[in-house]
Image: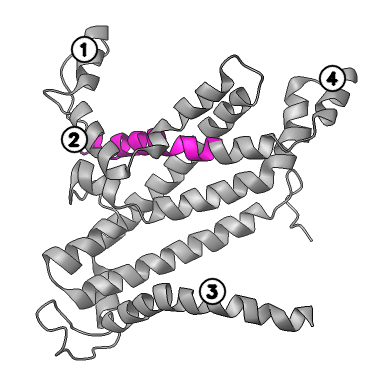
Amino acid sequence: MRRRAVPLFVLPMAAVLALVAGWPLARTLWFSLTDATLATLDDHAVIGLENYYWLGLDPVWWRAVGNTLLFAGVSVTLETALGFALALVLNRRLPLRGVLRAVVLIPWAIPTVVSAQMWAWMLHDLYGVVNTILLALGLIAAPLAWTADPALALPAVIAVDVWKSTPFMTLLILAALQLVPGELYEAARVDGVPAHRVFLDITLPLVWPAVMVAVIFRTLDALRVFDLMYVLTGNSRETMSMSVYARQHLIEFQDVGYGSAASSALVLVVALVTALAITAGRLRLGDGEPER
């Protein structure tokens, strides 16, 4: 009886998801097969996969794909490493530990558009505080155009994202660390196990599932990044993400069909990367054999 009742509980949620997510996705897929524009939404022709063909030939699209994958890979890696380190520190019995945890979460609590605009001013080549500090320390000889220089724009965007999203990783990893039984650490201390072995043999395996969940969520968020890049660098090709590319064609160029094809391709890339991340997360630490 209980198994038969499961679909009855799942059905309302599935219906809501189909309405909220399924219908817009299906409509986007449909428009990607047409020559629709904002002026001809009600009068367009079906052209099949032609939009996808031209998308595959567009070097700007592939530049956007490369920018997005590089952004996601570097930012998520740095956020995971820094988040793990901060979580280990905050998991210790420190004075004012509660206050420190609250302070660490401040960057994550700030809306992305607000933090991006704040950093845009801080990174300004003439009036930004970042250049002022670096010049005062003698680390640079002249002000740097952090968001305009092609060589610095993407690293600057990644740095801002790491500043904002590391608290998210810290929070999830800290929650996992607090579930590790203290008796394991006590036994390791009594046996004289070195600290690095305690981390590799006790801490990391026990928090690995939570780490992978955090990594997957952050990867999904990073792959669809839009507001951070758009506020800091606009439509610059050096930092353009797949979302910025799709938005440019949908809104500025008013090409709904082609922009919908770019949006559909974005969903495909996100799905593929997510599948790879989930598969990698199932590998055992050390031997590389999949968990059964």
Q: How is the image coloured?
A: one colour
Q: Nearer the viewer, mark 4 or mark 2?
A: 4
Q: CA distance from mark 4 to mark 2?
A: 51 Å
Q: Quadrant of residue 151?
A: top left
Of label 2 and label 3, which has the lower sequence position?
3
Span shown in magenta: 148-170
Q: CA distance from mark 2 to mark 3?
A: 47 Å
Taking 211 as reference, is 99 above or below it?
above
Q: Residue at x 54, y 35 (%)?
A: 170
Of label 4 and label 1, which has the lower sequence position?
1
Q: CA distance from mark 4 to mark 1?
A: 47 Å
Amino acid type at mark 2: Asp
Amino acid type at mark 1: Leu
Q: Nearer the viewer, mark 4 or mark 1?
A: 4
Of label 1 and label 3, which has the lower sequence position?
3
The label number, if any, that marks residue 135 in the structure image: 1
Q: Which residue is mark 3?
A: 13
Q: Which residue is mark 4?
A: 189
Amino acid type at mark 4: Arg
Residue 123 visible from this viewpoint? no
